[in-house]
Each structure stands twice: as C-alpha cells, then as structure tokens.
Image (tube, helix red, strand yellow):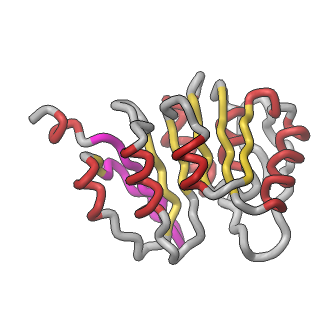
Amino acid sequence: MRVISGSARSINLITPKGFDTRPTTDKYKETLFNCLQPYVGNSVFADLFSGSGAIGIEALSRGAKTAYFCDNSKEAIDCIKQNLAKTKLADKAVVYKEDVSFFIKNRIKEIPDIIFIDPPFKKHLEKDVIPILSEKGLIGEDTIIVVECDYDADFEFLNEYSLEIFKIKEYKTNKHVFIRKNTERNNI
C-alpha cells in the first residue's frame, strides 16, 4: 500500500498486523480520490475508523490543510503515527486513540469538509456515527461524507437527518457511498 499522489507520492505505508483492519486497496483509493479531488485542496478531512491512516494521509498528500484520525486500536494509532512520520505530514494531523462516538462528541471542534467513515464491515456503525455528526452540527452545507461499506448497508435513515446519497461507487467486495445535505429538503 502506498500514497497515490501529491507531496508524499509513492511512499509505502505500513498497515496494522492481523485481520482487524482491512486497508482500502490502491485501486479503490485512487477511484475514491478521483471523485474527491476537486474538494480536497485546503480542506479539513476527518478519517474515522482510520486503521493505517492511508485515506487521511492521501488527503494530506493531495493538499488537505488538516486531517483528523480516530481509531480505538493502539496498534492502528501507532501505525498511523509511523506513516505520518514517514510521509512528513505529522504537523498537519490530529490523532486520537478513542471510540469514534466519543471523539465526535468531545474532540472535533470544526466542521470537516470531508468525512471518511470506514467502520468494521457488517457492523453498520455508520448508523450510529452519522446521527452523532448531525446532532453535533459537524455536517456543513458543503460537507461530503463517504462511507466505505459492504453491499448490505442500508441508508434509509439518512432522510431523518436531511441527508442524501449523491453517488455510489461499487467494487468487487464493497462500495463507497457519497452523502451530503439534502438541498431540496433544506429549501422547503
């Protein structure tokens, strides 16, 4: 696994050992950032359930001004810190080892431009995280949320929070679901 583009291009990243973390493949990461590229420069990026930190690091490499990383695994946090040091991007990163819900409720103080959520598959924790983001006022008018999830993930709950899916990228084993504020509902 490596950084695809930007200031840290081609630097190899390490991943936590074991099967608790499933890193986004370079191919899927490239597709993701092809979709996000117009929004990444000078953005505030939140990488939730960060694992190796590869997604947030890619955002920093491509010009994000700040990236928040949150994971509850000590091994993942150690890995993120090593990858940030290796890419020389640590000065733009804020790293927390704690539960994502606690992090959202207590730590993040600015509205992210892009929020990447990659919870453990089949647990559907996005159903817990997105409502907390909404209740804390951390989803701005232009915020883009991307959820990496399995095909079975259900997003019917988004209507309750005036959110909508505006794009889905499907891959062999999973998908990226792109979410934003529902502007039609907000204009009623």
Q: Where, by quadrant of the figure, is residue 119 drawn?
A: bottom right
Residue at x 86% of width, y 56% of height: 14
Q: Where, by quadrant of the figure, is residue 51 drawn?
A: bottom right
Magenta segment's dominant SS is strand
Does residue 38 sit above or below 80 in this rendering? above
The x, y position of residue 56, in whole percent, is 67, 43
In the rendered picture of this protein, how many numbered marks are placed on residues? 0
The x, y position of residue 157, in whole percent, is 29, 61
Residue at x 51% of width, y 77% of height: 122
Closer to the camera in the image, 166 or 34? 166
Closer to the camera in the image, 1 or 110? 110
Side (left or right) of 26 relative to 108: right
Please tell me whether residue 103 belongs to the stretch shown in magenta. Answer: no
Residue at x 62% of width, y 52% of height: 29
Q: Quadrant of the N terminus?
A: bottom right
Closer to the camera in the image, 4 or 128? 128
Please tell me whether residue 179 belongs to the stretch shown in magenta. Answer: yes
Does residue 146 sit above or below 125 in this rendering? above
- The magenta span reads 165-181
Question: Extreme left residue here?
Answer: 188
Residue at x 29% of width, y 56% of height: 158
Side (left or right) of 115 relative to 21: left
Side (left or right) of 88 relative to 68: right
Q: Where, by quadrant of the figure, is residue 88 drawn?
A: top right
The x, y position of residue 147, in whole percent, is 48, 56
Q: Quadrant of the C terminus?
A: top left
Closer to the camera in the image, 30 or 68? 68
Does residue 144 sit above or below 121 in this rendering? above
